[in-house]
Amino acid sequence: MLNIDIPSFIKESITNRPTSFFSSDIEANKEKLSSEIKGKKVLVLGGAGTIGSSFIKAILPFEPASLVVVDYSENGLTELTRDLRSQNIFIPKEYITYPFDFGSAVFEKMVSAKKFDIIACFAAHKHVRSEKDHLAIEAMINNNVFNTKKLIDLALKSKPSHFFSVSTDKAANPVNVMGASKKLMENVLMSYTDELKISTARFANVAFSNGSLLAGFIDRIMKRQPLSAPNDVKRYFVSPEESGQLCMLACLLGETSDIFFPKLEEDQMLTFSTIAIDFLKSMNLEADQCSSEEEAKLKAANWKIGDTTYPVYFFSTDTSGEKSFEEFYTEKDDVDMTTFEALGVIKGSNVPNKSDIDLTLKAFQELFNNDEVNKAKVVNLLSTYLPDFKHIETGKSLDQKM
């Protein structure tokens, strides 16, 4: 039943760009990119995910000497390798994938045994839905913050030419714990920018990325289940290819402490419900808008090939941590909008003192080790160290929705 060219759908109905948003910046900086990548040893963490694998595909044409990819998903690494080996793309002779947790002891042994020129980290908790309770939040902060600090400390032993760790637009004026954890991660990164060349990037939703609502549309159709989406949340979108290119440019062309973001305009934001309607149209189906989840599930169970409509359920957002719109920077940021055609850069970010960062992380560790810890206390502690964090709490999680 599913007969749709996803890359073409993204170009025609989501980004409305026939070519990459970043193609001109890549072309203008091709020699610089080549000099920074060709013959270099590259480590990519979280490389089996959508953004990490897209980053890999962006750098491979510039012929690195070696590529080591780390991801805790063994299946994901297998698919990455099959995907790369099935394309006409340069793959260095030394290409190794490791199914490691990048906070593990065996990962530390591997990094200590090798010297990398480029380290790019995409291993992260990325979903707003991950803020369920204090246990889920602890896992998120451990991954996004504590493990990032461990990685930087490891990198200091070999001093790579470039260190990159991906951030999120949700770190700008965060309203959810995921965004706050990434803002805290940015603070950790900035505290080391006098010792390493460190950059990061905030960017839009990656259309049809692994685990995203849009990728879920494919699964829902294949399983004869209704499409469900908010109708009041607007988001910017980039393609998977563009996400990797953005990170390549940010990693290799930025100065230390730079935070990159795409120069997208407000009128380019879309609602998920609009995309759902267009997704069905691309398969010659009309959205049958239902008034409840129950009605939508019943209609989907009775759906058959040949029907011209497909059940959908659209709703107003009422879950914790959901922002109605996206922003990449705040009014307090010093923003360079001229160096690159499609990229803006936040310059001169505040550089926290390392001792202050250590005290901050110690406070979180002490709270997590306290028997009386709960979500509210973690949120309050985040607010103490991140004055711009204004948490939206409704008592509902995305896990309570289809």
Image: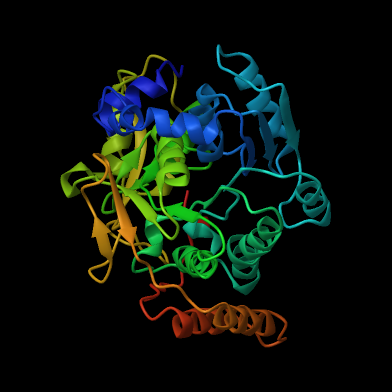
Where's residue 272, x and y in %? 32, 43
Q: Quadrant of residue 374?
A: bottom right
Please name whichever residue, 43 or 170, is drawn nearer the observer in this view of the structure: 43
Q: Is residue 191 left or right of residue 65?
A: left
Residue 231 to residue 49: above or below: below
Q: Is residue 336 left or right of residue 119?
A: left
Q: Quadrant of residue 85?
A: top right
The colour scheme is rainbow
Residue pictured at 44% horizontal, 20% vertical: 304
Taking the image as drawn, is residue 289 in sight? yes
**Which residue ends up furthest to the left in the rendered image?**
267
Residue pictured at 65% horizontal, 82% vertical: 362
Residue 396 to residue 74: above or below: below
Q: Quadrant of residue 142?
A: bottom right
Residue 42 to residue 168: above or below: above
Please name whichever residue, 7 or 96, is drawn nearer the observer in this view of the structure: 96
Picture mark count: 0
